[in-house]
Amino acid sequence: MKDRIKDALEKVKSFKESSSEKIEEFRIEYLGQKGVVKSLFADFKTVSNQEKKEVGQLLNTLKNEIQDRIDTLKAKVSSDDSSSDNDSLDLTLPGNKFTLGSRHPISLVRNEIEDIFARMGFSISEGPEVEDDWHNFTALNFPEDHPARDMQDTFFVEGYDDKSLRTHTSSVQIRVMENEKPPLRSISPGRVYRNEAISARAHCFFHQIEGLYIDKQVTFKDLKYTLMQFAQQLFGTNTKIRLRPSYFPFTEPSAEMDISCFICNQEGCNICKYTGWVEILGCGMVDPNVLINSKIDPNEYSGYAFGMGIERITMLKFQINDIRLFYENDKYFTNQFKSYIV
Ligand code: DAH
């Protein structure tokens, strides 16, 4: 028995093959189910009691020696592989797994809203984020002394009297009306900026989608119906809408739209502050002054406009309670929206 072990030990020590296949054959020969070590351990029963200790130690030495040998040779094979050229690449090995990223929730909701309006015949238009006073304020019928023009709300561009970061996407309305002839049906998504303190509910930049429809004899009824269709497609077919009178310089009459709270089904919850309704957008009939400023005759054409914050809608939809999460790029946040298919 001792001789058989010593014999095996010699062979193991002199084993020098350096291909993966040969090493694997070696491993099977010695450590496999029907291998040398297994059979030696099986015969261990027959060893006399006096010799058991010595033979046992020898057997363990052999086993460790085999494992060492295999590890050393394998390490050599893999270091040879990586230092040699592509010929030694083992193409049968499984590849590295690529994990797919996910779309940002703001993009998901923006795409979804765009799709809904595209199906209703709206096209998409964009405008610059650095905007002039005319498009951001004056053409939109903001009086000279309107508080929204105030330094507190607007980021001005240093060195350019007339330039600021747009405070809303309504500026794109004007550009669309200036550049194209009615009938017009367009939505304008994009980023907007406001000089506000950052908190869980507000940020100094966010995203809006503006809507504009100009044609002959467009009425408030058209606006209401379009917005109801929109709300039901985005939040579910049972969604109800409610329009409350409001004020915007660029629309007359103006309204704010609430939807029935889809979280509590109007039973009352902290999202709707126990009112059963949540506000999602501003809207109204385009003020005749705005049409005139954009060289459209208000006697011939009328239209409606609306504007909504994408963050706000996304936060409602997914019950996100802090707007700052959108801008941190934490993959544990963004990956939660992986399965949301529009
Ligand atoms: N521009 C408004 C805002 O930023 C949103 C808005 C309200 C847009 C009413 C409109 C509208 O087109 O008709 O708060």
Image: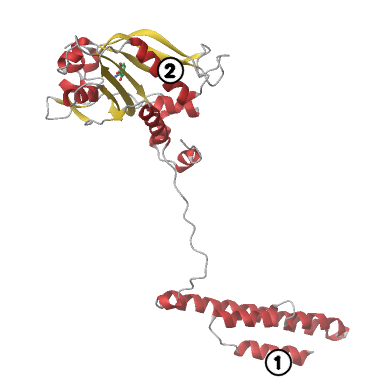
Residue mark closest to the camera, 1 vs 2:
2
Task: Quote the CA–CA distance across marks 1 and 2.
Answer: 88 Å
Looking at this view, is 96 or 341 the one in front?
341
| Horizontal relation, residue 304 to residue 244: left or right | left
Quadrant assignment, res 285: top left
Is disc 2 surrounded by few (<14), some (14 to 19) or many (20+) residues within 10 Å?
some
Is disc 1 surrounded by few (<14), some (14 to 19) or many (20+) residues within 10 Å?
few
Residue 168 makes an appearance in the image: no
x and y percentages locating residue 82 in the rendered image = 44, 74
The answer to whether 174 is drawn above or below residue 6 in the figure is: above
Quadrant assignment, res 166: top left
The answer to whether 300 is drawn above or below residue 236 in the figure is: above
Whether the residue carrying mark 2 lies under 8 Å from ligand 1 is answered with no
Helix or strand or loop: what does disc 1 sit on? helix
x and y percentages locating residue 205 in the rendered image = 31, 29
Mark 2 belongs to which amino acid?
Met
Q: At 46% from the left edge and 25% from the top edge, which residue is drawn?
A: 233
The disc at residue 228 is 2
The answer to whether 9 is drawn above or below residue 169 in the figure is: below
| Horizontal relation, residue 239 to residue 185: left or right | right
Whether the residue carrying mark 1 lies under 8 Å from ligand 1 is answered with no
Residue 112 makes an appearance in the image: yes
Mark 1 belongs to which amino acid?
Asp
Task: Report which residue position mark 1 lands on.
Answer: 7
